[in-house]
Image (tube, rainbow, N blue to C red):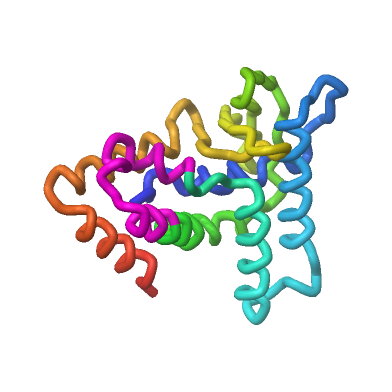
């Protein structure tokens, strides 16, 4: 699952690291930048470098991601109409496993960060929803458009989807989950997720 999008997690968490700051940037962009600064500080901390610190480093990054990613909203959207088929316990289990899958799949990409540059290109707020747009310039001088979608929860703006070059992270997983659930049960889907998460 998710192999087509190795850049999504990296884009969603890191690309705001060196944005040219604008006085017109609102709370969604500002909060994303705060999160990004925390992640960058971990990745560039000499005391956290090396394989021996990998577990500690990843735990710190995961904690920061938990503060900015709305795993419940992301899970609900990724399952689409299948979400209402799950009971409360199954929903909790799915959210936990799905977030662990994302953590496992994309953490190495986060740690491969090597100073990708990004340009803030726009922010749109519609009541409790926001879109933050940017363009990422990779180390190979390729420009990639990235769109972060956020939902307001209290005073926080939480990411619930990231689209890279027009391809949505949530939509990608929804397609995969739809395919699985058209042929198997919710319990079988959860079993497959457990298997993925436990793979070494």
Q: Nearer the viewer, residue 150 or 105?
A: 150
Where 122 sits versus 154, above or below?
Answer: above
Please give left or right for residue 182 compared with residue 38 in the image.
left
Is 84 in the magenta?
Answer: yes
Relative image position of residue 166 (x, y in whole percent): 46, 26
Q: How many marks?
A: 0
Magenta region: 73-95
Q: Residue at x 43, y 31 (%)?
A: 167
Residue 108: x %, y % from top left: 54, 61
| Above-or-below relation of 105 to 120 | below
Q: Is residue 110 above or below residue 151?
A: below
Task: Using the rendered view, name the quadrant where residue 110 is placed.
Answer: bottom right
Q: Position of residue 90 (x, y in %)?
A: 33, 57
Helix, strand or loop: magenta stretch: helix
- Tell me which residue sits at (65%, 81%) in the image: 52
Q: Looking at this view, is 53 or 185 the one in front? A: 185
User: What residue is at 79 percent from the left and 66 percent from the top?
Assistant: 45
Name the quadrant of the C terminus: bottom left
Placement of 132 over or under 107, stated as above or below? above
């Amino acid at each position: 699952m998710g192999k087509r999008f190795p850049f999504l997690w990296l884009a969603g968490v890191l690309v705001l690291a060196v944005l040219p700051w604008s006085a017109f940037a609102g709370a969604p962009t500002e909060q994303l930048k705060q999160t990004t600064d925390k992640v960058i500080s971990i990745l560039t901390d000499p005391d956290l470098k090396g394989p021996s610190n990998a577990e500690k480093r990843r735990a710190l990054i995961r904690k920061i991601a938990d503060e900015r990613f709305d795993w419940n909203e992301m899970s609900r959207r990724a399952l689409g109409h299948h979400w209402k088929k799950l009971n409360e316990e199954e929903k909790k289990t799915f959210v936990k496993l799905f977030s662990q899958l994302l953590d496992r799949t994309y953490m190495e990409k986060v740690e491969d960060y090597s100073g990708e540059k990004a340009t803030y290109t726009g922010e749109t707020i519609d009541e409790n929803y926001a879109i933050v747009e940017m363009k990422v310039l990779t180390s190979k001088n390729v420009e990639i458009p990235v769109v972060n979608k956020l939902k307001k929860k209290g005073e926080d703006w939480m990411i619930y989807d990231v689209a890279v070059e027009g391809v949505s992270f949530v939509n990608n997983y929804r397609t995969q989950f739809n395919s699985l659930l058209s042929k198997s049960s919710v319990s079988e889907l959860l079993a497959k997720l457990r298997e993925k998460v436990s793979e070494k």
